[in-house]
Amino acid sequence: MKYKTLLAKKYLNTFLINCIGLRKIPIPAIEWIDNIKLQFIFSTESSFNLQYRCLEFSKMLRKMGVGPYQANCYIMGCDKTSEGLVIDPGDEVLRIVEEISRNSLKIRQILITHGHIDHIGAAKELRDITKAPVLIHSLDAPALNFPPDGHLQDGQKIEVGHYSITAIHTPGHSPGGMCFYAPGAVFTGDTLFAGSIGRTDFAGGNHQQLIEGVIKKIFPLGDDIRVYPGHGPATTVGRERLTNPFFRMSQTP
Ligand SMILES: [Zn+2]
Ligand SMILES: [Zn+2]
């Protein structure tokens, strides 16, 4: 699949993107490519030529695969205040700090989806450098080799610049597993991946809890919400709700 280069914001709402290459019609008809929200408009018979309309750009968001497990570390920033947060600094603190500097961000929060080493490995170093507090659910806090600055609870709001992020407790991959919802996007850690879910055979894991948590707390966020998982590519809530094999089975009456 190939996309013509997406240009500047001035094309918002009018720019049509031709997608060249064989692919299925997207489900749902709203898609994200990089940080751009697109609405599917038109396809030729062969579906070699799809057209999208650009709806909006997401917030300043960087995704970096870090460490040997290539856990996704996300850096999110407020364009207006240049305040930002980091989700899951798993490793490679220097690369993370470089990216923060490149975007001239003042990091205000370090959020941890869960206490596995590939997601927390650089948390202490990043805290020492940025002086931002590290927040994690109390049930996963013992995995850190330092006391966190705060414990996350289900429904807690975290304000960064003009953004409000909501912490959602989704145990199952680990007892203190959290997802983070920001308008338009949800960061799911190792709870939900594109086409799969996290392992539940670690200590404290629970398959049923994970499935129920996603169905009750993530799916209701809306089909066009972008899902940023702890490993692998981004997806959408709708795509996972309709095509993820772990949920297709669960939702069959
Ligand atoms: Zn994990
Ligand atoms: Zn992981």
Image (spheres, rainbow, N blue to C red):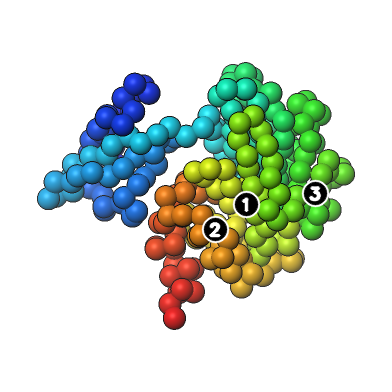
Instruction: Tell me if I can see residue 68 in this picture.
Output: no
- Relative to 61, residue 90 above or below: below
Asked if the residues shown at circle 2 and circle 1 are in contact, with their CB atoms under 8 angstroms apart, the answer is yes
Q: Residue at x 26, y 53 (%)?
A: 24
Quarter containing the C terminus: bottom left
* Image location of residue 8, percent across then percent down: 36, 21
Q: CA distance from mark 3 to mark 1?
A: 14 Å
Amino acid identity at mark 2: Ile
Instruction: Residue 30 in the image: state x and y as whole percent.
Output: 35, 47
Reply above or below: 44 against 204: above
> Residue 138 is drawn in which quadrant?
bottom right
Q: Does residue 131 appear in this view?
A: yes
Q: Which disc is residue 218 wearing?
A: 2
**How many numbered marks are there?**
3
| Secondary structure at numbered mark 1 | strand
Q: Amino acid at mark 3?
A: His
Horizontal side of 240 relative to 78 (left or right) equals left
Q: Residues within 10 Å of mark 1 (few under 14, many from 20)?
A: many
Residue 54 horizontal side relative to residue 81, left or right = left
Q: Which mark is residue 151?
A: 3
Residue at the image position 51 percent from the left and 55 percent from the top: 221
| SS label for mark 3 | strand
Q: Which mark is residue 5?
A: none
Q: Amino acid at mark 1?
A: Cys
Residue linked to disc 1: 179
